[in-house]
Amino acid sequence: MNKRDALLDLCHALGEPHRDLVLSAEGNVSMRLDDHTMAIKASGCALATMNDDDFVDVDIPTILTLLDGESFDDRTKATYQASLRSQTSKIPSVEAILHAVLYEITPAQVISHTHPTAVNMLTCSSNAHLLVEGSLYPDAIVMLGRRQVLVPYTDPGVPLALAVREAVTTFMAEEGVAPKIIYLANHGLFVVSDSPRDALQLTEMAVKNARILHGSLAAGGPRFLQPQQVNRIDQRPDEAYRRNALNVD
């Protein structure tokens, strides 16, 4: 299977109604094609019914020029159109700038953005901070890493891209690796991954983790693992083997 077919399969999986990750044209997915180019879902397309023509290839450095200066609202449409690598009437997703920033500062190969109901029930609550306060069980550590990122609500587009760049840069300075999961308060979930398969697995685990957190709150409150327990799971040789087998290392 070639890369674009694998990316299409990811879109269709994320758009399956029973997963409750997106509705209608919500969410977006992209793939790094080379150091300067990404393929990203076109604005207004539904993940569940995507086809190859619904991706647009864009120049990452051109998109990133939106971060320079002000009045980005006036420049966004023209910049997005100028970034297109081929002639098309479609334009990239509004979040193309956020994808471009993540490709600039992390080694990501595939990025997915969804609005899972289970996750947003927490990101839209006063308990959103609990998503990144600790780890509840070993598999969450193996799949999602020791820590994740939560970004306060920020206007989508350039402001959100700037906020995410700051949060992820700080995380990487502290942890030495890029985050796999970025929670956006009152908005949704970004997954930074190595492959379409990885992106789907991480999304599923983030949703499961949110559901378990819901349950723990209903049962009296979460009991997070102790830091030494988290570090032990993170560093176990057998868990490193499992990460590699699952392609989530």
Image (spheres, grey):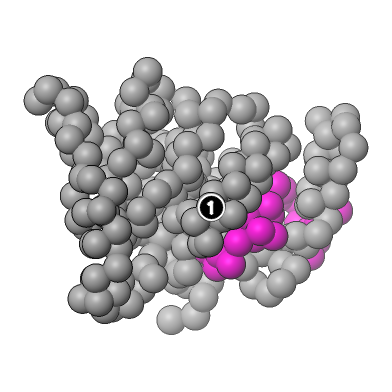
Image quadrant occupied by the C terminus: bottom left
Q: Which residue is mark 1?
A: 174
x%, y% of residue 23?
41, 36
Which quadrant of the structure image shows residue 77?
top right
Where residue 183 sits in the image (x, y, percent)? 45, 39
| Residue extending farthest top | 126
**Picture quadrant where residue 202 is located:** bottom left
Asked if residue 86 is among those painted magenta in the image, a careful observer would answer yes
Q: Nearer the viewer, residue 238 or 17?
A: 238
Residue at point 72% right, 67% down? 37
**x then y, percent, for residue 84:** 78, 58
Q: Is residue 204 above or below residue 244?
A: above
Range of magenta residues:
82-111
All told, the count of numbered labels is 1
- Asked if 212 appears above or below 56 in the picture, the reply is above
Q: Work out whether residue 99 or residue 139 is closer to the camera in this orientation and state it.
A: 139
In the rendered image, the vertical position of residue 109 relative to residue 120, given as above or below: below
Name, please, the residue furthest toward the left.
219
Residue 200 among those drawn in magenta: no
Which residue corresponds to the image point at 47% horizontal and 63% vertical from the top-left?
193
208 horizontally vs 150: left or right: left
SS under mark 1? helix
Horizontal relation, residue 145 to residue 187: left or right: left
Pick the front one: 70 or 237: 237
Q: Residues within 10 Å of mark 1 (few under 14, many from 20)?
A: few
231 is higher (above) or lower (below) than 166:
below
**Residue 38 in view here:** yes
Q: Mark 1 belongs to which amino acid?
A: Glu
